Amino acid sequence: MADCIIDSGYNLDCASIGGLESVWIGSYSGSTSYAYDVDNVVTGATGANDVYKMEMDIEYGGLEQTGGFSRENGTVFYESKLSVKFIELDKDLRNLIIKLGRAPIYAVVKSNAGHTYILGVESAGRATEGTASLGVAQGDMNGATLTFTWKSQNGAYLMDESVLGTDITVA
């Protein structure tokens, strides 16, 4: 069994903060290779496709990971879900959500706590839920919400922030 020896504990830190500060999405490429440090933090990428920043307001994006652990089958996997909200359903947003709904993707996210994660190291993500709405009342949202899902052996990886903008180009 690989990497199943417990050799450290967990120290409770001060309070943290939830949510995402920034999201970048690009087309997935199975030929991208990644470099890692001793803590399995991504420190480099070769052959990665460009990513595009998806601007969002505060509390418009989230990342949730759920572990699947089967004693019966001897398997462990993680399901990672990235949710994003976009405001004002115009022609540009409509065309973008059509493309995002069809494309295999990878994503880089920066949490409000200051950590950078990469999704799509082991498998492509796909749009799994989405709603576009003009609302009914004047105070209703005019825009779209999308959820992208990845299933992989190790879930999202932490990534050295310097990889974004160097090995992974922001277009």
Image: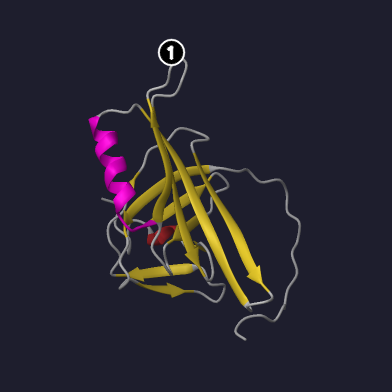
Q: Quadrant of residue 84?
A: top left
From the viewer's perspective, tell me whether residue 152 is left or right of residue 87.
Answer: right
Is 168 situated above or below 88? below
- Is residue 98 within the magenta segment? yes
Q: Is residue 159 visible?
A: no
Which one is in front, 72 or 51? 72
Query: As shown in the figure, which amino acid type bears the numbered disc 1?
Result: Gln
Can residue 77 be seen here? The reply is yes
Residue that extends furthest to the top in the rendered view of this protein? 138
Main SS type for the magenta part? helix
Is residue 61 placed above or below 30 in the rendered structure?
above
Residue 4's x, y, as percent? Answer: 66, 80
Where are the magenta residues, as a range?
91-106
Q: Position of residue 82 (x, y in %)?
A: 48, 49
Q: Residue at x 72, y 78 (%)?
A: 7
Which residue does the image show at 32% across and 62% down from the upper left?
A: 28
Structure colour scheme: secondary structure
Circle 1: element type: loop
* Residue 139, magenta (yes or no): no
Give the image location of residue 39, x and y in percent: 57, 72
Residue 20 relative to residue 168: left or right: right
The crowd level at tag 1 (other Cα within 10 Å; few <14, some 14-19, many 20+) is few
Query: Residue lying furthest bottom in this view?
Result: 1
Query: Which residue is the site of mark 1?
Result: 138
Residue 111 in picture, x, y percent from top left: 53, 48
Name the image quarter holding the N terminus: bottom right
